[in-house]
Image (cartoon, rainbow, N blue to C red):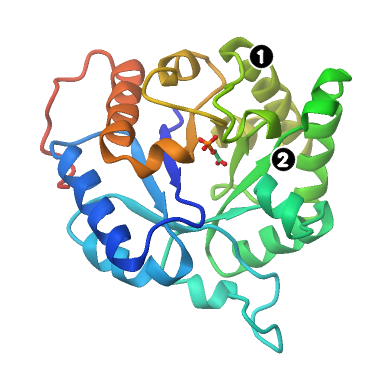
Amino acid sequence: MRLPLIAGNWKMNTTVGEAVELVRQISKGLSGAYDVEVLVCPPFVSLAAVKEALRKTSIKLGAQNVHSEDKGAYTGEISPLMLAGLCEYVIVGHSERRQYFGDTDDIVNRKVGAALRAGLKPVMCVGESLEENEAGRTGEVVTRQVKAGLAGLDCSGSLVVAYEPVWAIGTGKAAHGKQVNDTARLIRETLAELYGQEVAADIRILYGGSVTADNIAEFMEQSEIDGALVGGASLKADQFTSIVRQTEEIFFPNNPPTKDLIPW
Ligand code: PGA
């Protein structure tokens, strides 16, 4: 069974002090223990401080981007070797990177490869634009992005794919659970073509795009969706913790409400 993953993408928000405070509130709100993997992705400059603040919890840490080279004359960039040991996950190919910073499928492929080589777990984002969606091209676009992003790479065990329709990100207009499930199934079929059924069955596929505490259940009830990549709502501790708790209730309805297996 795939362990559900709720990831917060804080984007370019929070100072170092605010990041530490937010993660304190989140861990307080999640006291007890959860079978859901929880991940926060603050800005680069806060990674070290947030790592320290999370020391006694099981909340995981991730970065929002990475460069494809290990070192060199790339002023302002952060390499996978700098992130290794600091965090466990890294978001790659987010649509805002593709849209504003020129991350092409080829660059995404190199970044995913670099992350894997450094022992980081990539959360590779794919998703169609509004135009592509309206033209009925969602399947074609997402399949291309998955194949191109993973070309030549062996990802078994460490890959997470986030399906984030561009038109649903930050707009308050989330996609529909059933549609997302169909696209997630297509992504899994594409992963099976690349890596075989068994490996594909273990790769987690998240939904992202205007996820809130009010609509999370609709997505988590779908068979092919294994969690969420949450932007805006991950900046509010009460929203984010509610998203985690609801996910746990949906995936593990028979669990006792509090367990002591995983200390927070
Ligand atoms: P949103 O962002 O939840 O604010 O729509 C999601 C994302 O960009 O990962």
Question: SS for tag 2?
Answer: helix
Q: Provide residue 174's location: percent of width, then percent of height.
A: 57, 22
**Quadrant (top left, top right, bottom left, bottom right) of the N terminus:** top left
Q: Provide residue 24's location: percent of width, then percent of height.
A: 20, 53
Instruction: Locate residue 144: give its quadrant.
Output: top right
Amino acid residing under circle 2: Tyr
Q: Is residue 153 visible?
A: no
Residue visible at 22% across and 63% down? 53
Tell me which numbered mark, 1 or 2, is placed earlier along the sequence: 1
Instruction: Locate residue 140: give its quadrant.
Output: top right
Residue designated by label 1: 179
Residue visible at 86% across and 24% down? 137
Amino acid residing under circle 1: Gln
Residue visible at 58% across and 47% down? 159
Q: CA distance from mark 1 to mark 2?
A: 24 Å
Give the number of the disc on residue 217: none
Residue designated by label 2: 195
The crowding category of the residue bearing disc 1, from other C-alpha atoms within 10 Å (few below 14, some 14 to 19, many at least 20), is: few
Q: Provide residue 83's location: percent of width, then percent of height.
A: 49, 71
Residue visible at 57% across and 31% down? 209
The reply to whether callout 1 and callout 2 are in contact (CB within 8 Å) is: no
Q: Nearer the viewer, mark 1 or mark 2?
A: 1
